[in-house]
Amino acid sequence: GLHHREHRGDDARRTFMMNRAITLAFVPLAFCFSSTPSPAPKPHKPHVLFALVDDLGFADTEDAGGDNGLIKTPNFEKLIEEGVKLDRMYSFSWCGPSRSSLLSGRTPPRVDDVYLNENFEEKDGMDPYNTVGNGIPAAVTTIGTKMKELDYHTAYVGKWGAGFTWMEQAPKARGFNEFYGYLQDSVSFWDTTRDLDSVSTPSGCELLEYNDCLDIYEKTNEKQGECNMFGKTPNGNSFTQDLWRYRVLPEGEINGPADHEVSLGWIDYQFLDETLRIIDDYAKEGGPKDEGKPLFLMHAFHSIHTPLDPPDEIFNEYKNPHDPEDPAFKSHQSYLNPARQSYAAMVHWVDKAVGQMVEKFKSYPSIELHPEGSTMWDNTIMVMTSDNGGPTYGGTLLPNNHQAGKPRTVKTPFPPLFGGANNFPLRGSKTTEFEGGIRINAFVSGGIIPEEMHGKRLGDDHGYMHISDWYNTFATLAGGDGGEGSDKLAISWSEGGDKFNNHNTDYPDSFPIPELNRNILQPDSKNLWPLISGESSEPVRTELYLSRTCLIVNDYKLLAGRDKDNINAGAVDAAGIGDAMLLFSSYNPGYGVFATAPTNQISLENCADGCLFNIREDPDEKYNLMDKKYVNEEYDKKYHEMKATLDGYAEDPAMNYRPKRTGDEGDDANNPKFIDVEGCYKTRGKGFVGPAFQMDEWTSQSEVVSADHSSVRK
């Protein structure tokens, strides 16, 4: 039950809540399968197509309501009809830790990518192993390396966001045969710069530059479009650009800035074209397909991350469809919001882009080890997932080109930097640990999904799934292992193997590896294929330790205050918001500023005494069971049991990787004293973001081929 013993006679209220949770069209339903299903034949080294959509809301696809019918995603609908919807998939509450979790096969505390600053001071004796830097540690085997070792052709396009302090953390070293994308968390859609209109949470060099601009603004009351604290780039940009390519050509190896390909137009168009090019090149005569290698292709969209700044032809597809005099429209004034219009239009475009990728897979025959006459798609597992919950946080909508009546075909001066997602009926937003921030929109499809599983939904009856579980799932389908004990590289470092013993030989001028850095934990990824294929109905997870402040066990979820590692921690601390206060806690369906109430301030929930929810019976977390209205002996006992477990996990080195990431004692990315000003000048002088300590190892595109070379995007 969800109420205090004195309230248990209130059957009408309880029944309403239960029926609402079960019958709402937006709330996923779990299908039950036979306890003894017939096992599906295990696919043999299938192709993998992974579509990672940035900041997609829980209700922003048609199957989940499409934001009351506003958003159309026909390709996703068809793929779900031929696949399986994953209704209890979880992630971290923001992008960096989720992406590191996905690529490393570890739940977030075990890989600990919560540090944002790439530009810390280089000191004598530092190397990738004694000073981890940002992102996944170099001593971890990622899914790219795992699949490459299993004889796949591996490719990654789009947003990286998993660390690049060292070249050993960049995409080539992570096992990808080719890469084209940006390395940090966000860039301008139009010129790939890290300007102030494209970075919603400044860190590192951008934080220093932002503070400098803020000082000027406070003195002059004029917004600064260009700060130039670190000067201009060689090609005259006021902000550093972020576009990296790794590709081996007959002329040589490119592993550095894609300096011929910046400012070519909307970046997601470029990323889509690149992915379609990779598929074509893979399948052409003499390509990797002819070598018998399956394709492992990850496409990480910039959409639907801020800045919400699509081109005119995308934006105009989603003009307000309602009559302004319609009462229903007047109650939904947010349809007038250009940020919401942009968001909805970008979701629709992503759906079309995924459809084009699927059609490419259907157009080519598969490799010899697959059934004769079958296509690539017939032998593919395809995943679509968000990296975290949709952002619904508010912000100031500044004037932009569209509102001024100008064509929206180039970068706008002030694109809206706030969320436009809808997570209905879930509470909360990206950057929070309410369900709206960590329960994500995801499905799996492809020709290898057994026909009897088509259109099924894996939900409450099948336990929890985590974005890190794709690591083990893909490795197992490829004929390998991605579970506990499968990362031999990490074992070699953490248990004193050859890698550790050879450290001083490989890096003779380095200082010893701190003990904290040696505690590299193994993957805890689970194989989802038995559930997806219908071979089993047993849950793969009944517990999720998501952070030092969030634990899920069976039906219950405990929130023990605000996560101090969160990306918004600096801004929240500066605002004087206490550690116990959870952000975006208002319970309003909708999106953007309309999902927060009141709209002109941040809504908060005090979890100083803990917040306990039954997320099966109350999926939208409306009832905090520790509230005096509901708490009783049963809930009090459950809270203390879970709090003791969470506290134990948070202090257990076998559950957490907390390495020395910089050459300083502190790892606070929001503290300017840990940002290396000299390094900021170096990257600005180079013009591009990248591993600043190893610029001599970069090989830019222009060093290998001329701008008119056939491999260069035009």
Image (spheres, rainbow, N blue to C red):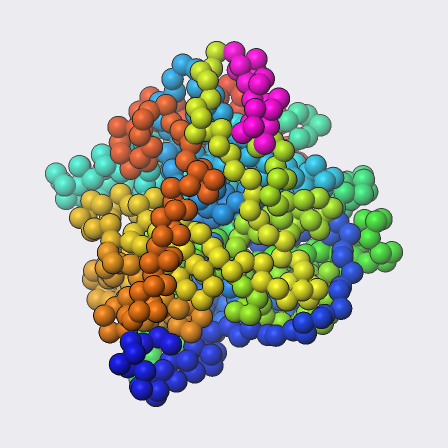
Q: Which residues are magenta?
A: 491-508
Q: Magenta region's main secondary structure?
A: helix
Of residues 445 and 459, which is closer to you in this image? 459
Residue depicted at x 85% and y 48%: 368
Q: Is residue 169 above or below residue 449?
A: above
Residue 558: where, in percent of width, then height? 36, 59
* Relative to 504, residue 42 above or below: below
Q: Quadrant of residue 139?
A: top right
**Pick the front one: 626 or 105:** 626
Q: Residue at x 62, y 61 (%)?
A: 444
Q: Is residue 633 visible?
A: yes
**Residue in the foreground of this view, choosing between 610 and 240:** 610
Q: Quadrant of the C terminus?
A: top right
At 39% across and 85% down in the image, what residue appears? 15
Quadrant of the snapshot with the N terminus:
bottom left
Whether the magenta-drawn stretch holds residue 504 is answered as yes
Residue 574 in the image: x percent, y percent? 20, 44
Question: Toward the viewer: 459 or 693?
Answer: 459
For the point 32% across and 41% down, the residue is 202
Residue found farthest to the left: 219
